[in-house]
Amino acid sequence: MRKHCSLIARTDFPMTEKHKGLGTAIFYSIRSCFAAKSRVHPAPRKIDDEEVATTTTNSPSVWTVWKKSSMGFHGTDGFSIYDGMGRLSFRLDNYSRKRKCFAGELLLMDGNGKAVVTLRPQVCDRWSGFRGEDGRETDCRSTHVFDIRRRSVLQSCDETEVLMDSTPDHKLPDFRTEGCFRRRNCKIMDRNGDEVTRISRNKENYSVAPRDHVFSLIIQPNKESELMAAFLVLMDRICT
């Protein structure tokens, strides 16, 4: 199967009798997905010693977000998030064909498919996040990380706020968003008003996806990228 997948990944590989067993529709679906991904984000590149020396932890990290499942099959709904080197770092593959509000819990994974955060829907545009896959357990209070909700009961409100489980005082949210997520023009602020993450349109114009389906996620230093990725996913659920 691994051999077949490597052959499918080549966009110039012709359809042969040997591969028809995979199914013509599936073959071309996977092959076109690989071709599209190469245009959304370049292939991973090697990092030389000089580049490593000039890279500091004081610089924001820039990620490319593609609002598309990494599996690429028709009917799937998800996200693929690439780091600055072009490597798939986070992915969310949702196979439900239901509307977003009825799709149930989601699982954010790293590039290798390991569970990072379980996202469970609550009531009234509120979601909870749990470490790993522990959110699927009945008693998961020990792994509960955060709650995120719409800042206003008005459905037109495009801003959210996050309450971290590690903070005993919930009079003020630990994080809040400003701007319009649907327009890919917003930022995540901490309780001190400092920007921790920015979401913006990608300057490049990709022919393989709508403009608002490929955008940038800019994370400030010393911030947990998996949490910012989880917030992004849930902002899409709540605000769109």
Image (cartoon, rainbow, N blue to C red):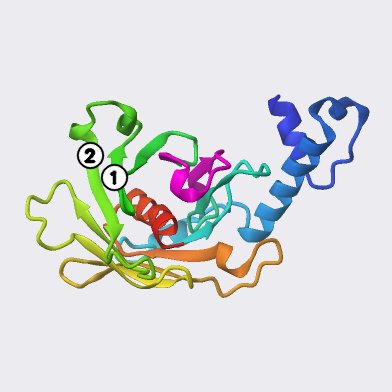
Q: Residue at 22% across / 27% down in the picture? A: 139
Residue on which disc 1 sits: 128
Q: Residue at x 22, y 71 (%)?
A: 194
**Residue on which the image places disc 2:** 144
Q: Position of residue 25 (x, y in %)?
A: 80, 38
Magenta residues span: 88-108
Q: Nearer the viewer, residue 88 or 56?
A: 88
30 to 35, vertically: above or below: above
Expressed as whole percent of the image width and height from the top left, the position of residue 213 reads 57, 62
Q: Is residue 84 above or below residue 89?
A: below
Q: Residue at x 14, y 47 (%)?
A: 166
Q: Tell me how far mark 1 sits from mark 2, CA to CA.
A: 7 Å
Choose top left, top right, bottom left or bottom right for residue 189: bottom left
Question: What amino acid is found at the position of numbered circle 2 in the picture?
Answer: His
Closest to the observer: 200 or 59? 200
Q: In terms of sequence position, does the residue under pointer 1 or pointer 2 come before the other?
A: 1
